[in-house]
Image (cartoon, rainbow, N blue to C red):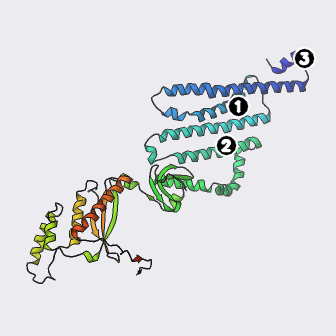
Amino acid sequence: MNIETFLQEHGLESSALISLVKGTILVTLATIVGWIAHVVAKKGLAGLVRKIAGKTATAWDDLLFDNRFFNRLSILVIPVAIYILAYAIDWVPGVALSRLLDAWITLSAVLVVTALLDGANRIYESYPLSRDKPIKIFIQIINIFLYCTAGIILIGIFTGKEIATLLAGMAAFAAVLMLVFKDSILGLVAGIQLSANNMIRIGDWIVMPACGADGEVLEINLATVKVQNWDMTITTIPTYRLVSDSFTNWRGMQESNGRRIKRSVNIDVRSVHHLDEKEIQLLRRSTFLREYIEKKLADLAEFNASRDNPLDARRLTNIGTFREYMESWLARNPDINLNMTHMVRQLQPGPTGIPLEIYCFSARQQWVEYERVQADIFDHLYAVMELFHLDAFQYPGNIVPVDNGQQHE
C-alpha cells in the first residue's frame, strides 16, 4: 500500500503534514532496516563464515576473513539495505540523503576492498616466500590509489560535478600533490628497486650507521623499513634511504657456511730469532709440526750443503714455525670451515710490532657461538706463543701512547 493513500484514508489530508509524517516513517523504517542489516552482517554472517572457515583444512580463509573485514562489511550493507527498501516501497530519497548514501557506499566499499587486500597480504606472509619477496609495499600502493579514487568520487557526489571534469581540474594541483606525497613516491620507486634487485628482505641483518640501525629487518612498507636492533630498540628508516645511502647486508654471510674471523696479534720484533737445536727438538714432537719440521730440515740441509758462511745459510725461525703451527692447528679445528679461505699471514710491521693475522671462517655463524670460536683460537694462540719464545707486543706500564705517535713517560 502507498504511504500517501494510507495517510489520506485516516484523515491526514494536509500535504505538509503528509510529507512530514511520511518522511518520519520512512526515515524510521530505513533506520530500523539498516540496523537489522548491520547486525545480521556483523553477527550472523560473520559467525557463519567463521564456522565454515574453521572446518576447512587451509588457514588462508581464516586470515582473509577477520573481524575487521566483517566490521567494514556490516557498515556497507546499511546503505545498500536502505536502497533496497526504497525500491521495494517505491520511495525516492531526497537529494541530500541520496548523496549521503552514495558517499557512504563509496567509502565503505573501499574499506571492504582494502580489508580483503590486507587479508591477502597476511595469507602471502604465512608462506616462506614472503621473506624474500614481500608484497606489502604494493598492497599499500593499491590502497593509496583506491583512497584517492574514492576521494575524487566523493567530491563529485557532493558537488554534482563529472569525474572527468574534476580530474581535468586536479591537473593544476599535480605539483602540490607531488610535494605532499613526495615520500610515498620516493618510497614506491625505492621499493621497486629493492625488490627487483633483491637488496633487502624481511629477516635480513643490516647495518646502517647513518641511521643508527644494526639489527634484523622486521617490516618493509611504502614509507619506512623497520629494523629491530640487537639492543631490542626499533629504528625506522625511510625506504628511499636504502637506495640513496649505503648499508651493509649480512645475508651473504648467513646464507654461506661460515662467518669470517679476521684478527691479528702483534709480535714483539725483539723476540724473533732462529731456532736452536734444543728448540727444534722440542717443537718437532708436536703432531702439528713434525712433518713440517722434518721436511723443512731436509730442504735446508740440501740448500746449505754448499754454503760455508752462516750468513748465506737458511735456518728455521720461531715466527715462521709458529705461523705454520697455527695454520696446521686451524686445519684440524672442527669449528673452522675448511672449504673457505683459511690462513695465517704476516702483515706490514709497524711501531707496535709484526701483526700476525688469523684469517678464516667459523663454521658456527650464530653470534654467541661465533665469538666463542674466535676467543678459543686466540686463547690458544697466546698460550702457546711462550713455547716458541715469542712475545706479544704491549706498551710498558710507564709509557702511554699519544695520538701524534710520540711516547712520553
Within 10 Å of disc 2 (Cα), the crowding (few <14, some 14-19, many 20+) is: some
- Residue 279 in which image quadrant: bottom left
Element assignment for label 2: helix
- Crowd band around label 1 with a 10 angstrom C-alpha radius: few (<14), some (14–19), many (20+): many
Q: Which mark is residue 128?
A: none
Name which residue lies at 46% across and 47% down: 133
Q: Position of residue 81 (x, y in %)?
A: 69, 27
Mark 1, residue position: 79
Query: From the image, which quarter does the C terminus lie in?
Result: bottom left
Residue beneath label 2, please?
Answer: 150
Counting residues from the start of the chain, the first of labels 3 and 1 encountered is: 3
Helix, strand or loop under label 1: helix
Residue 37, quarter of the rendered image: top right
Q: Is residue 261 left or right of residue 294?
A: right
Which is nearer the N-term, disc 3 or disc 2? 3
Cα–Cα span, label 3 and label 1: 33 Å
Name the residue that disc number 3 marks.
11
Q: Amino acid at mark 1?
A: Pro
| Neighbours of disc 3 within 10 Å: few (<14), some (14-19), many (20+) | few
Position in image of residue 88 (x %, y %): 73, 23
Q: Secondary structure at mark 3?
A: loop
Q: Position of residue 193 (x, y in %)?
A: 49, 55
Instruction: Identify which amino acid the numbered label 2 is placed on.
Output: Ala
Report x, y in % for residue 219: 51, 49
Per the model, the C-alpha gap separating discs 2 and 1 is: 16 Å
In the depicted structure, whether residue 372 falls above or below residue 31: below
For this view, does 82 lie left or right of residue 352? right
